[in-house]
Amino acid sequence: MLLLDHVSLSVADIDFVRPFYDAVLATLGADKVYDRPGALGYGVRCNEIEDFHSCLAVYASPEARPDAQRHCCFKATTRAQVRAFHAAGLAHGGRDDGAPGLRAPYHANYYAAFLLDPFGNRIEAVCHRAE
């Protein structure tokens, strides 16, 4: 079961984070579904026939504040995607918050990388499969 239909993050400046999200989400195969003033959307939107998709929205908000407890994790199908996600994030203004690697406390094949987006939101990519 996929629990989330969509998730939203807020940032102070969309133009500041656009290159970052375009790059990191492309490494995971997520298409941009909209790009308008004040909002970006990635993934696949649900409809009345296909209700199993998920989507990330990034909204501009002058009141937005980074919060270390705010965290979004994206699924990767390979460990190579996790590494590409991390590298793309660093190349596009993100900051390292955990290099790609196994996180055994979660389970033996939990392979993840963590980034802070240019605004300070914490995001992760994880592959649950063995290499």
Image (tube, helix red, strand yellow):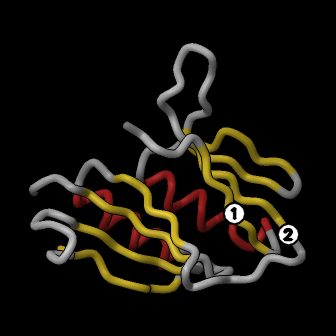
| Quadrant placement of the N terminus | top left
Single out the mark in the foreground, 1 or 2. Answer: 2
Q: Which residue is drawn at 34% across and 73% down?
A: 113
Residue type highlighted by circle 1 = Arg
Q: What element carries label 1?
A: helix
Are the residues at dot 1 and dot 2 in contact (C-beta closer than 8 Å)? no
Left or right placement of residue 74 versus residue 70 in this view: left
Image location (x, y in percent) of residue 7? 62, 53
Earlier-in-chain disc, 1 versus 2: 1
Query: Splitting the image into 4 quarters, where does residue 99 fall?
Result: bottom left
Q: Residue at x 62, y 16 (%)?
A: 48
| Quadrant placement of the C terminus | bottom left
Image location (x, y in percent) of residue 70? 58, 74
The residue to which callout 1 is attached is 18
The residue to which callout 2 is attached is 61
Whether 108 is drawn above or below 77: the answer is below
Left or right placement of residue 2 versus residue 69 in this view: left
Nearer to the camera, 37 or 1: 1
> What separation in Å lies between label 1 and label 2 (alpha carbons)?
14 Å
Left or right placement of residue 31 versus residue 109 in this view: right
Residue type highlighted by circle 2 = Ser
Q: Which residue is drawn at 80% across and 76% down?
A: 64
Nearer to the camera, 93 or 61: 61
Whether 72 is drawn above or below 68: the answer is above
Q: Which mark is residue 98?
A: none
